[in-house]
Amino acid sequence: MPSISEALNSGKPPLGAALADGVRTLSADQTLNFSLYKRYVFPLDGMNYWIRIPSSANNVTTPGIQLNPGLASQTTDGGAAIQVSPGGIGALTIVGGTIFNPLSATDQGLATAEPLYVDFTGPAYSHETTTTREVMSGANISIPPNCTNGAWVNSPSDHHKFSVILQKSVPSVTLPTDVEVEGSLHYSSRVDQDEDATVDSNTVIFTSLTEVQPFNQIGPDYLYICHYTSPDGGTNLIFAFSSRGRLYEQADLYHYAGTALKSRHVTQIIEDVTQFSPTLVVSNSLPIWLNMPNYIPPYPGFTCPIPLYPSYLVDDNLPPPFGSVHIEKTESLEMGSAFGPTMQQDQLCSELVRIHLYGCDNLTASNFLAFVEQYSLDWMKLGLSHTPAIRDEKLTQPEFKVIAQRKIIEFDINYRQKVVRDETRQFILHAKVQWIPQWLI
């Protein structure tokens, strides 16, 4: 009868089986438990929270990601391009992927290891050009989302082997609420002494004996988080993984990396939804801007042509067009505050508001600027201290030799804090029950 070690190592390549035994020995058969959390975005100020899904739910069905192999795993004739990722309509559900050129000649199926050539604009050449990129042995390259021209590969030699993994958006995946993973945890700590706080920063690397499939299938609104306590009880970490390291196929080990939750951010992780009662956090004009796209003039006029998001909290991989709102230089224009009947303070304030626009042509950006000016005149919730101008900005991506459609508009505004609170109360009436998770309804 085979041992547990032999059973777990079945199907692994010889090197992978040996390394797996080593990981178990070093980690003393360590396992980590991950719990599923759902993202909640507070509509008044765009603050992100992660709310734990109770284990009693067992699993959650949600739109997510499915990993599929590429259209090919080796070239046919040397110098002839081969397509490895679909283009056209087929590319609309592909949200990313990876092309990996093996390190050794044996894994490439060749006598001598050689580079691979990749192109995302059309058939690849067997050498570097302005659009065809060289991928050296042991390296990889990411496939961009919605690549309508497809991804193409070429090699000077016949039957050059490589690996392609496509990330496909699917309408439904089932995610378990709790995942137990066997492997070995490594972490390093340092103390960051900043002007505003002194915090521990812990870098976490987890070597898993198997690929954690739920991590690959998860969508942007869900996250697996681990609460780890060291055997001696001296270390308590809360962490999630932001990346997975390069995979050496013969080793068959998977390395996940991330940074543990810092003390300044613990307020954003919610363990018990029944104790969660979100309130407005920001103290500036952001609620006015986030609610602004909902305004439709009662007469023929400009409407907001794009959705707006708070800076640093834009949805993951959001396709244009959209805008982000960044606010700075909040200053009072009065000698002191006025107090309301409940001791709420009210001041006349000024701010610099920077709007980043993506995917907007000149007409769309001009319409947005006209909409803000019209909104200011119609409601007088904020005043404009000058006439803003639309500024073009360069944001490059060398792989494609392109620049993004990026524009910036800066507004010098003034407003009363009481108006922001009034705006917030109206917004609450519109959104007051949106935060209740489905499993509690």
Image (tube, rainbow, N blue to C red):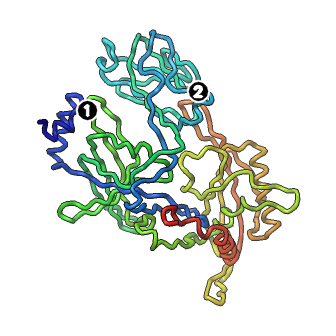
- Where disc 1 sits, the SS reads loop
Please indicate whether residue 250 sits to the left or right of residue 129 in the image: left
Q: Where is residue 184 in the image (x, y as percent from the top left)?
A: 23, 47
- Where disc 2 sits, the SS reads loop
Question: Image point 43% across, 28% down: which residue?
Answer: 164
Q: Position of residue 273 (x, y in %)?
A: 45, 68
Q: Where is residue 129 in the image (x, y as percent from the top left)?
A: 54, 19
Classify mark 2: residues with Cα within 10 Å, few (<14), some (14-19) or many (20+): many
C-alpha gap between disc 2 and disc 1: 33 Å
Q: Can residue 195 be seen in the rendering of this structure?
A: no
Place residue 101 in its image quadrant: top left
Q: Where is residue 363 in the image (x, y as percent from the top left)?
A: 79, 44
Amino acid on which the number 1 mark rests in the picture: Ala
Answer above or below: position of 360 versus 163.
below
Question: Image point 63% across, 65% down: which residue?
Answer: 286
Between discs 2 and 1, the one toward the N terminus:
2
Disc 2 target residue: 87
Please indicate whether residue 187 sits to the left or right of residue 395 in the image: left
Disc 1 target residue: 251
Place residue 269 in its image quadrant: bottom left
Answer above or below: position of 11 versus 424.
above
Q: Where's the N terminus, which quadrant?
A: top left
Answer above or below: position of 325 versus 263.
above
Camera-nearest residue between 291 and 114:
291
Amino acid on which the number 2 mark rests in the picture: Gly
